[in-house]
Amino acid sequence: MRLLVKLSGEALRGTLSREEGDYDEPTLAGIVGQIKTLRDGGHQVAIVVGGGNLFRGSELVHKLTIERSTADYIGMLATVQNALVLRDYFESKGIVTRVASAISMNLVCEEYVPKRAMRHLEKGRVVIFAAGLGAPFFTTDTTAVQRALEMRADVLVMTKNGVDGLYTADPDKDPTATKIATITADEVIKRNLKAADQAAIALARAEGMTLKIVGLPDLHHALDEGIGSIVTPS
């Protein structure tokens, strides 16, 4: 089975604050262990990584007089940095990994070419997609759906920090929030639930793609019944 995993940039920081650091060694080791478990189970694994632990374009736009598109491109570069960190960390643990960037930077990683990326997956390599879609105004959530479709992934797994699935509200702020087992994309959009950004949910719905939302510690059990939440296209 071919899996596309969405990792947020914040996930790489673990429990560290922005002041304490951008990467947490135990968290990286945990991610590697879970990816290895999935590969050992015979699955092909690709990853889309965010850049929120390093930079968020929306934050800079509110601080400086710069174009939103410029800020978004800087954010894409943050995802490349995270992808390179993950690649080298994975390889240090014996997992052959390639980074494919939507923005050409051949000195540090490959340019994203769909057929080449699929070939890496077929050879058992982990592929990390960086630089989002290579265009401003699109999030890495939307990138994850797009890449899952292009790679013909069987499952798109969206990992979450601090929660084990999709809830009716933020459980840290609302004690009445309850976990959702299964929900349609229409309901997610209508109720503005935080499964992913709405453009990503709309694209998944339009293309008939099901999303599995799990807590990061449950990534290696993402395919198990009863783990996380499922967002169906209809």
Image: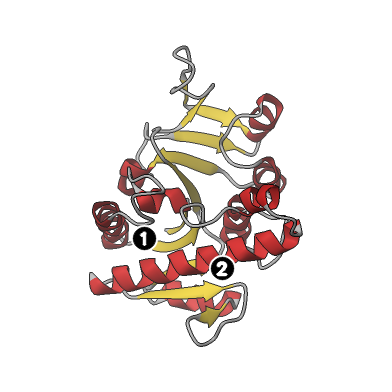
**Marks 1 and 2 close (CB-CB < 8 Å):** no
Q: Name the quadrant of the N terminus.
A: bottom left
Residue 207 screen position, x and y as percent: 69, 50
Which is closer to the viewer, label 1 or label 2? Answer: 2
Residue 145 screen position, x and y as percent: 60, 53
Q: Quadrant of residue 179?
A: top left
Task: Give the labeled residue for mark 2.
Answer: 77
Identify residue type, mark 2: Leu
Secondary structure under tag 2 reads: helix
Identify residue type, mark 1: His
Q: Which mark is residue 165?
A: none
Label 2, residues with CA under 10 Å away: few <14, some 14-19, many ≥20: many
Residue 174 to residue 80: above or below:
above
Name the residue furthest top. 176
Q: Which mark is residue 43?
A: 1
Name the residue furthest bottom. 107
Residue 174 to residue 213: above or below:
above
Residue 26 screen position, x and y as percent: 23, 53
In the image shown, does 145 or 74 lie closer to the viewer? 74
Give how far apart the Cα atoms at labels 1 and 2 are.
Answer: 29 Å
Q: Is there any visible trace of residue 200 in the rendered image?
A: yes
Q: Quadrant of residue 102?
A: bottom right
Residue drawn at the location 39% of the way across and 56% of the way down: 22
Secondary structure under tag 1 reads: loop
Q: Earlier in the sequence, mark 1 or mark 2?
A: 1
Residue drawn at the location 35% of the way across and 47% of the way down: 219
Residue drawn at the location 47% of the way across and 33% of the way down: 229
